[in-house]
Image (spheres, grey):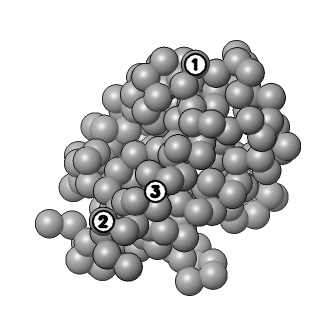
Amino acid sequence: MDNSARQSLLDDIAAQVRDCSNCRLCEGRNLAVSGEGPADAPVMFIGEAPGAAEDRQGRPFVGPAGQLLNQLLLGAGLRRPEVFITNIVKCRPPQNREPRPEEITACREYLDGQIAILQPPLICLLGRPATQTLLDPTLAMGRAHGRLFEREGLSFMPIYHPAAALHNPNMRAPLEQDFAALATFLQDRKLTP
């Protein structure tokens, strides 16, 4: 499938997300946040859920965590327009709480569709909720972060969520180490320009 066909399919998912009422999160949202990035992205980043800034703009990772993510991407040899970014749920949970299992389930078809269309060489899972949703519900971030996992023909790398470093400065070093592991993966697979 060529990039324009894949982009068209991603656009179809985005339209479905905008009209979604599969769970109660739709009742409090301003804008649903499907995700963004090129159909041929070498890396897909999957976070937890939109925050307040994302809910206002309808774009993923545009708040403080997104600004830090942009810096970390540059350090790994990537620019934001080169990667695809989304979340396990597409609407903001109240008070930025973690998504509930039924909310994750309600959005899962959209996320699975995005992954199937993109088939990226690497999927980076930002934080525990994304890691446990896509890999193993018992997997601890302390043991998983920065490591590569292969599942069903896809490569996954759990990475600490950038928000963790904003809330706890001690998390900045492990987060930077995770992005160094990402840079090594990209160089080894010749996925950076």
Residue 71, can we see it? Answer: yes
The correct choice, above or below, for 150 with respect to 69 in the image is below
Residue that label 1 marks: 30
Residue 27 quadrant: top right
Residue at the outermost right position: 102
Q: Residues within 10 Å of mark 3 (few under 14, many from 20)?
A: many
Q: Please give left or right for residue 161 compared with residue 109 in the image.
A: left
Q: Which mark is residue 187?
A: none
Q: Please give left or right for residue 5 compared with residue 46 in the image.
A: left
Residue at the outermost left position: 193
Name the kind of residue labelled 1 in the image. Asn
Q: Residues within 10 Å of mark 2 (few under 14, many from 20)?
A: few
Q: Nearer the viewer, mark 1 or mark 2?
A: 2
Residue displayed at 31% across by 38% down? 70
Residue 8 on image: x %, y %: 40, 59
Q: Please give left or right for residue 163 compared with residue 141 in the image.
A: left
Q: Residues within 10 Å of mark 1 (few under 14, many from 20)?
A: some
Circle 3 — which element?
helix
| Marks 1 and 2, the one that precedes in the sequence | 2
Residue 167, can we see it? Answer: no
Closer to the camera, 123 or 55? 55
Residue that label 2 marks: 4
Name the kind of residue labelled 2 in the image. Ser
Residue that label 3 marks: 10
| Marks 1 and 3, the one that precedes in the sequence | 3
Residues marked 1 and 3 touching at CB (< 8 Å): no
Gap in Å between the C-alphas at discs 1 and 2?
29 Å
Residue displayed at 63% across by 81% down? 152
Which part of the image, by quadrant, shows the C terminus?
Answer: bottom left
| Marks 3 and 2, the one that precedes in the sequence | 2
